[in-house]
Image: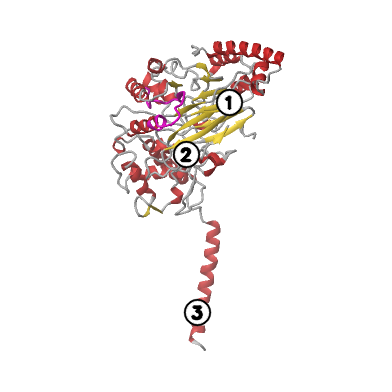
Amino acid sequence: MNPHNKLFRRLALPLATACMLAVVGTAFAREPFTAAELQMKDDKLMESVKRGHDIWYGGRADTSTNGLACANCHPDAAASNPQTFPKFLPQFNRVVTYREMVNWCIENPQAGKALDVASVDMTALEAYSFKLHRGKPIEPGLNTRQTTGIAVQSGVGFRTKPTGIGFDK
Amino acid sequence: MTVQNDGSRRKFMGLAGKAGLTTFAAQAVGVNLGLVDVVSAQTGKRPVTPFRFAIISDPHLYSFNDHVFDRQLEDAVAQVNALATQPDFVLCTGDVSHHGEADQLAKGKRIFSKLKAPLRVIPGEHDWYLDMGVEYRKNFGEETWSFDQKGVHFIGLNSILTPDFWTEAKLTPQQRRDWFMPLASPVPGVWGVHQKQLDWLKKDVANLHPETPVVIFTHSPLWDYYPRWNFQVSDSKEIRDILGKFVNVMAFHGHVHHTVYNRIGNLTSIGTMSTSWPWPYPPVELPYPEFQQYRADPSNTADGMGSAVVSVDRNGGGFVNYQPFADSLQPAIRNGFKV
């Protein structure tokens, strides 16, 4: 008898049992996260998004010496295009990450002090901007004539969608 | 509110009377005066003498000395001053200042004083809500006005009025102003011109002939572009109805900080570039996308801003030339467009 066949016979039953257990286990195992765990994770993300929103709108003084903030040019994070990074940018003459571009804006138009790219605040800026681009396809390197974020559904006091008045050409 | 009138209405009445007499005399002796003059005299349409006006939008001046926006406004002033044919006047569509502070509005007046042509201003929300227009009026006069220029009727309205959300909440003037700083601020809500100005507008145009060319300026657009960013005037429908009797209405606005065009019935709406920074386009499908300016290159500090000049022809039609600081315009509008 081929020694391999002998080995197979000896292992067949345990292997089959293990496979069956795995299948049954998958069917009856709990979800990777409980509802409470998912809520906690979402809450933590939203904390970061809100922190990012505040910095985006000028909440961290050392990121600007001329009064300008991210939101001057990027209301609702529009045209910040996090989903198009990494990409080559002429002012760097190399491929850069979104965080590097954020720091470029802080140091140039805002004439402020760059953030540590691994800092909580930089993560928060990224969280805010990515949150407002959710659902957009990830297209590294995309250079477009015009891009916009998503139509934001929050904001008390504003109608969130255009009514269409005016589009009657 | 005051109505500023340069007296051309009186001049027109005089001219119309003379034209009527002349037409009568010409008909009597069989002289052909030319079709336009005869039609003008018979219909009451006022004759238009071609001229230009320029538009400078949204300087957003800060209190810092030698701020980058000071220099960009100075560039726009220099652009207009360099025009070979000078405009009859220059219109600023509001947001002269960023925080409505006295020094910012005074700085705006100082920089604008370098213009060769006279200046007209309407307020933006950034100019207004610190002191409800006190410093604005000191520097630039009343916020609602109209005048006649060479046969064209010009109107300026204060389009950034919101309901009072500050009194009951006991907000300080600074707090009230600060709620207008973010473009998508959650508190003030959509703004408009409100009833008092609508009543004024009705009276202002009541006696104008329908063929009178009308040009109206508001800070934000007279159509429902993107209300979340207040790219609208809440009572624009009422304004369009009041102006509905006119053959042609040109509406110019700032606030959006980019080029945009729309036409609703007799009203053509044209958005102008700012001198401070370009806003991106909102997530709205535009009816005339060829009027969009290119996305600004952040590494080119001059890109995305500029001024505009409008030439009015003898029929009261307009020809708009955006004057970007850099290469911002699509080919369709690069050499100007008719309105």
Can I make out residue A162 in this image?
Answer: no
**Chain where mark 1 sits:** B
In this rendered view, identify the residue nearer to me: B199 or B53. Answer: B53
Q: Mark 2: which amino acid?
A: Pro
Q: Residue at x 64, y 24 (%)?
A: B247
> Which chain is mark 3 on?
A
Write the start and end of the magenta stretch as one range: B78-100
Q: CA distance from mark 3 to mark 1?
A: 102 Å
The residue under label 2 is B280
Category of crowding for the residue at label 3, using alpha-carbon neighbours closer than 10 angstroms: few (below 14), some (14–19), many (at least 20): few
Is there CB contact under 8 Å for labels 1 and 2?
A: no
Q: CA distance from mark 1 to mark 2?
A: 36 Å
Q: Main secondary structure of the magenta part?
A: loop
Q: Which residue is mark 3?
A: A10
Foreground mark, 3 or 1, reads 1
Q: Are marks 3 and 2 in contact (CB under 8 Å)?
A: no
| Quarter of the rendering containing residue B240 | top right
Q: Quick check: is A168 in the magenta stretch?
A: no
Which residue is under mark 1? Answer: B314
Task: Provide the chain ID for the residue under circle 2.
Answer: B
Residue B120, image x and y in percent?
A: 45, 21
Give me the C-alpha separation between circle 3 and circle 2. 69 Å
Q: Position of residue B196 (x, y in %)?
A: 54, 13
Q: Residue at x 49, y 84 (%)?
A: A4
Q: Residue at x 51, y 80 (%)?
A: A8
For numbered disc 1, what is the local secondary structure? Answer: loop
Q: Residues within 10 Å of mark 1 (few under 14, many from 20)?
A: some
- Kind of residue indicated by mark 1: Arg
